[in-house]
Image (cartoon, grey):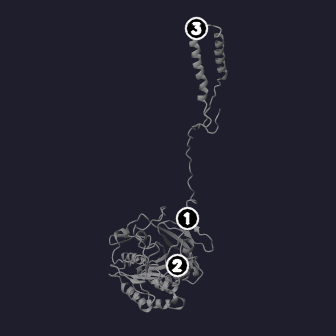
Amino acid sequence: MQNDNKSGHIKHVDIEMDTHDRAVRRNAGSHTRSSSKSSSTPLWLICILIFVGIVGFFLIRLPSKLKPAENAQVEVTSPEPEVTEELVPEPTPEAAVPADSSLLIVEGAEEPETESGSEELLLTPEAPTPSPTPGVHVHSFVKGICSVCGAKPEFLTDWLPDEFYQETNHAGTVTAVEYDTKAFAAYDLLTYHKRMNVYLPYGYDENKPYNVLVLIHGQGDNEDDWLVDTHESGGHAMCGRIILDNIFEKGLAEPCIVVTPVTETKHVQGLTAGIVQMQDELRETILPYIVEHYSTYARDGSVTGLQAARSHFGLGGLSNGALFTYEGGMRHDFDLFGSYCAFSGNGEPWKTVSAIQKDEFAALPVDCLFTGAGSLNDWQQNYTKIGFEHFLEKDSRFVEGENAWNVDVNGGHEWKVWFTCLYNAMQVMFQTM
């Protein structure tokens, strides 16, 4: 019988004993019949018959031992298949596009093209989203008091703790995004090719919405200063991306998307031109792009979609970036941003207050205004303080200690001050009244 169920084969041979059995029985019978005619049987013949009987008995039982029972399981062992190592071809350059590669906005195209020469600045970790430190929750400050635990925000006035300058185990990503935008400052039909950086917090989940903070650099800087470049100060190497990673990992603020565009370029020269260009660029190019490509609270990138999600968008900057926050952001885009942070900068606050008290801007709430400057040798300290006090005096929507704060930091016009101010501001940004 042949078993064909496996690749290996086992043959079972059935030994047919019936013919031999009948012969043995027939011979034994003939001896019995012949013995009946004799009065006595020799002893040797009796011994032979007994021996033949025993042998016959075992020969009869042998086939049943060789045959498997009807319900018995017959184990068939197949030889192990020979393992052949298959060579996987190297991916082609077209297929090897990183998930967060830089994107090029092509006006009128449905999908952005991939910029093959662009570089992802930090790979996205594949680990799941971490929880904040056990026992620590993200505060929700409403009117300056956490609605969960009753705590008040704790602001620093000196160096950040050393660990905030060190890499965490849960690093966010910074991606360079290239895009085309109209030349708003030139009032012509030119198109400028520009670049911005987009920070995504560790564990970014496209299925949940995120707040968006836009940070503007200072004079002579660019889109890399806030998130990518390392700044040396007082023996510390400071990087904004690492500081944000630490803030979010420690549960000091809810993780958010941070966008750092560049204002002045070779096409846009001068502070005034940069403000005019950026105030429209934010409204018509940058924010719509962020909403369309990342998970935010806005339903779409239209002006009405952005206005409806205003409390989840914030704007800030340092030095000239603070100036833009007031003159370009508040005066022109007050309907798109609910939270503001301005470090070491002023920007004629009386004009800004006048602008936000007109028309539809007058009915919009203020979620947060956080300002600060260096308390030592920062030539913008007094201007920053004067501007803050003007908002408190002239507009009742700004309430000190509830949605408005000014905290100076021990230092000058330098990154030590601005990163500490960012740490302070992140705790109270996006907190609706």
Relative image position of residue 413 (x, y in whole percent): 36, 79
Depth-wise, is mark 1 or mark 3 nearer the camera?
3
Residues packed near mark 1 inside 10 Å, few (<14), some (14 to 19) or many (20 plus): some
Residue at point 35%, 77% (across, down): 156
Where 169 sits versus 347, above or below?
above
Residue at label 2?
267
Depth-wise, is mark 2 or mark 3 nearer the camera?
3
Residue 116 disc label: 1
Relative image position of residue 191 (x, y in whole percent): 58, 77
Label 2: which secondary element: loop
Where 373 sits versus 101, above or below?
below
Q: Earlier in the sequence, mark 1 or mark 2?
A: 1
Label 1: which secondary element: loop
Residue at point 56%, 9% (across, down): 43
Residue at label 3?
42
**Quadrant location, the N terminus:** top right
Closer to the camera in the image, 242 or 370: 370
Disc 1/disc 3 C-alpha distance (Å):
109 Å
Residue at point 64%, 28% (across, down): 14
Where 235 sits versus 8, above or below?
below
Asked if the residue under mark 2 is in contact with the one under mark 1, i.e. CB atoms within 8 Å, the reply is no
Residues packed near mark 2 inside 10 Å, few (<14), some (14 to 19) or many (20 plus): some
User: What kind of residue is marked 1?
Assistant: Ser
Residue at point 59%, 18% (across, down): 53
